[in-house]
Image (tube, grey):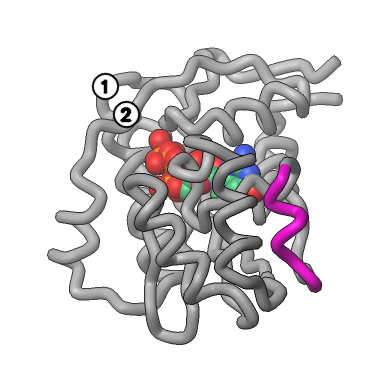
Amino acid sequence: MVFWRGTSPLILASQSSARKMLLANAGLEFEAVTADIDERGIQAASELSNPREIGLLLAREKAKAVSVHRPGSHVIGADQTLALGDRLFNKPAGRTQALAQLRDLAGHSHELNSAVAVAHDGKIVFEDVSVARMTMRQMSEAELSAYLDAAGNAVTTSVGAYQLEGLGIHLFERIEGDHFTILGLPLLPLLAFLRNEQLIAV
Ligand SMILES: Nc1nc2c(ncn2[C@@H]2O[C@H](COP(=O)(O)OP(=O)(O)OP(=O)(O)O)[C@@H](O)[C@H]2O)c(=O)[nH]1
């Protein structure tokens, strides 16, 4: 049992089912609030091209956007970017885009940058970004289509069109990085921060 010692509830500024699952499985009780920000607009206006910096910027903006309306609460924001060389990928809109993305990723290594930020009264009090390197095996058109047939619409909910803890594992020949980073939330540094602030006690 994890004890929350904060005086106000913990908030996760996310609608990501994976992020909610990771926090809940770690024993944390929290309220999930969607961060209503224009991610692509903020990214474009920043003129940033570094995937790590883009992830941190969006994680901060999500956390702050919710924090300003929830005084006293610690608000967690997160964002994940996928980079293949200097190309950035976003969540595919549907099967066609998922197939196109997977064709480009197959046979190559890409990087997932998962950023997390914590805001309190509108100010960032913690941030971290962790990276995972994913090597996807070479796959034929028939193999990619069979994967998409089996994985279904879930592929549109993740930036790489895969759920590693599910059928996505079949796409890879090598994975370097921690499981939580891959699923989109660098949990170890986040928990270390909450523990150091005496906001959680296990
Ligand atoms: N279940 C699962 N989800 C993954 C995996 N890899 C990436 N994701 C999800 O892909 C999404 C990355 O897109 P983001 O823009 O960072 O987040 P989002 O889904 O829009 O959710 P918000 O936090 O509300 O912005 C996140 O929800 C990640 O949890 C994976 O292997 N498994």
Horizontal relation, residue 43 to residue 156: left or right: left
Residue 169 within the magenta-colored segment of the rendering: yes
The magenta stretch is: 167-173
User: Does residue 192 show up?
Assistant: no
Residue 30 within the magenta-colored segment of the rendering: no
Amino acid type shown at disc 1: His
Horizontal relation, residue 42 to residue 193: left or right: left
Pointer 1 with pointer 2, Cβ within 8 A:
yes
Q: Is residue 112 above or below residue 63?
A: below
Residue 26 quadrant: top right
Give coordinates of residue 7: x percent, y percent: 55, 14
- The residue that appears at 71% across and 45% down in the rendered structure is 167
- The residue that appears at 66% across and 27% down in the rendered structure is 21
Element marked by disc 2: helix
Residue 15 quadrant: top left
Q: Residues within 10 Å of mark 2 (few under 14, many from 20)?
A: many
Residue at mark 1 = 69
Give coordinates of residue 48: x percent, y percent: 27, 74
Q: Is residue 9 above or below residue 66?
A: above
- The residue that appears at 35% across and 26% down in the rendered structure is 34
Q: Residues within 10 Å of mark 1 (few under 14, many from 20)?
A: few
Give coordinates of residue 67: x percent, y percent: 34, 29
- 159 or 61, nearer to the observer: 159
Element marked by disc 1: loop
**The label number, if any, that marks residue 66 in the structure image:** 2
Give coordinates of residue 194: x percent, y percent: 67, 37
User: Does residue 75 show up?
Assistant: yes
Label 2 beta carbon within 8 A of ligand 1: no
Amino acid type shown at disc 2: Val
Q: Is residue 145 above or below residue 10?
A: below
Q: State which quarter of the image contains the C terminus.
A: top right
Task: Determine the CA span between mark 1 and mark 2.
Answer: 6 Å
